[in-house]
Amino acid sequence: MEVIRRLRGFTLAAALIAVATPVQAQHWNGSMSGANENPPNASTATGFADVLINGNFLTVNIFWQGLVGGNPAAAHIHCCIAPGNNVGVAVGFTGFPTTTSGTYTNVFDLALQSTYTSAFFNNFGGGTAAGARAALINGLNAGNAYSNIHNATYPGGEIRANLVATPEPASLGLMATGLIALAGVGIRRRRHE
């Protein structure tokens, strides 16, 4: 009986930790379309942007197809402004392919000043890489960042993804385990009452 009591105590403590621990978003993504641009456009192109930050490393994965405005001239993450508005570039995607359909993957070191545009580094980052990294993460977590692809026909951007936080599967699993454990403790307590 003592073992069961200790097990229940451990289960309750683990559940409370799992539920009480905030899940810090480190993963953001969004669907790219012309309708998300400002102003919206009638492009039939589509895409998907996926952004992951692990420590000081930013991994960017972009998939797009059917750009109607020509080959990409540039692509980047813009930050930090509420969705539906325009703001300057935070991180430019170096080596972005100049094809109307394709994929792009790159890893950027957020500890380097050269990762950011000078305007973002100085205005949002306060002139430090640590400040720029914090501003980018805060903007992403607030839903105030977007990724888009620009070309000759759509210099303001043909398709855009408003980047939103996506919890990691491991975090969701931990939270689910905690909630299940709490439910189990509650059921057991009702049986003993």
Image: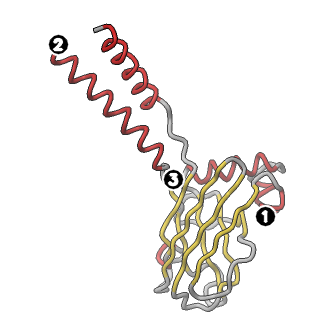
Provide the residue designation for mark 2: 192
- Mark 2 or 3: the one toward you: 2
On the rendered image, what quadrant is the C terminus found in?
A: top left
Q: CA distance from mark 1 to mark 3?
A: 23 Å
Mark earlier in primary sequence (2, 3): 3
Please provide percent x and percent y for residue 168. Answer: 49, 49
Figure colour scheme: secondary structure
Please report contact status of discs 1 and 3: CB closer than 8 Å, yes or no: no
Q: Secondary structure under badge 2?
A: helix
Disc 2 residue type (three-letter): His
Mark earlier in primary sequence (1, 3): 1
Looking at the picture, tell me which residue is in the foreground, 123 or 91. Answer: 91
Picture layout, residue 188 above or below residue 155: above
The image quadrant of residue 174 is top left
- Mark 1 or 3: the one toward you: 3
Please provide percent x and percent y for residue 192. Answer: 17, 13
In percent of the image, x 32 and y 27: which residue is there? 182
In percent of the image, x 74 and y 53: which residue is there? 124
- Mark 1 or 2: the one toward you: 2
In percent of the image, x 46 and y 26: which residue is there? 17
Provide the residue designation for mark 1: 117
Disc 1 residue type (three-letter): Thr
Please report contact status of discs 1 and 2: CB closer than 8 Å, yes or no: no
- Label annotation for residue 97: none
Provide the residue designation for mark 3: 165
Mark earlier in primary sequence (1, 2): 1
